[in-house]
Amino acid sequence: MAIPAHPSLVVYLGIAALVVWRLYSRVRRMVGRQKMSDRRTWIRIVFFSVLIAMLLLGSAVHPMHAAALLGGTAAGAALGWYGIRLTRFEQTPEGLFYTPSLHLGIALSALFIGRLVYRGVLLYSASGTAPNTFSPAEFSGSPLTLLIFGILAGYYVAYAVGLLLWRRRVVPFGPEIPQ
């Protein structure tokens, strides 16, 4: 069996397949009817808040990167609150359900996927040039990438907080809703 000339191509294709699978499941979650889950909602809030904080800490030496991340997070939070207003909520005997806005979910997914594809193509095309001309730090260190990530992360955090507030309004102090 012959060894491929570019083993990195196999690695890139494997990573791309994994990313496509995760993006597909994320897009399905952003546009379909979902059962309310406190655990998943809290995990989303903590996860994206920690990621924002870590990226902000890492970009502290680059004011433009920090400003892009903070600006994106603020825009994403505004979109998250707008998304909550567009969400259809249901209280049924089976539990609490919500259906996010189809248009907003598709727009955010397309923005993020488009940027990932663009940066992936850039990374792959630079890998064929002289060694070490494109560092991994450049992949995530672009202000535009941080802006788009901030929009997505801010949206997830604000939307999740909105879901928890809605749940508290609907079931103020009753028994825990089965997850």
Image (spheres, helix red, strand yellow):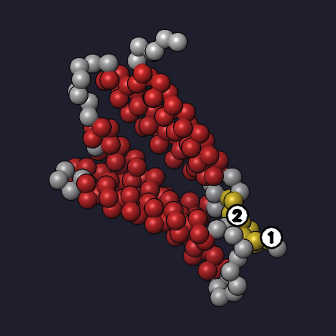
Residue at the image position 41 percent from the left and 13 percent from the top: 5
- Taking the view exactly as shown, the residue that stands out farthest to the top is 2
Coordinates of residue 46 in the picture (x, y in percent): 45, 66
- Of marks 1 and 2, which one's residue comes earlier in the chain? 2
SS class of the residue under badge 1?
A: loop
Coordinates of residue 78 in the picture (x, y in percent): 45, 61
Whether residue 103 appears in this view of the structure is no
> Which quadrant would residue 128 be assigned to in this image?
top left
Residue under label 1, please give it: 94
Label of residue 140 in the image: none
Report crowding for label 2: few under 14, some 14 to 19, many 20 or more residues within 10 A (C-alpha). Answer: some
The reply to whether discs 1 and 2 touch (Cβ–Cβ < 8 Å) is: yes
Residue under label 2, please give it: 35
Coordinates of residue 37 in the picture (x, y in percent): 64, 68
Whether residue 131 appears in this view of the structure is yes
* Residue type, mark 1 in image: Glu
- Taking the view exactly as shown, the residue that stands out farthest to the right is 93
Q: Nearer the viewer, residue 123 or 114?
A: 123
- Whether 53 is drawn above or below 32: the answer is below
* Residue type, mark 2 in image: Lys
- Taking the view exactly as shown, the residue that stands out farthest to the left is 61
Coordinates of residue 138 in the picture (x, y in percent): 27, 38
Q: Nearer the viewer, residue 6 or 111?
A: 6
Report crowding for label 1: few under 14, some 14 to 19, many 20 or more residues within 10 A (C-alpha). Answer: few
- Whether 161 is drawn above or below 100: the answer is below
SS class of the residue under badge 2?
A: strand
* CA gap, disc 1 and disc 2: 9 Å
Residue at the image position 52 percent from the left and 12 percent from the top: 1
Residue at the image position 63 percent from the left and 52 percent from the top: 29
In this picture, residue 40 sits left or right of residue 69: right
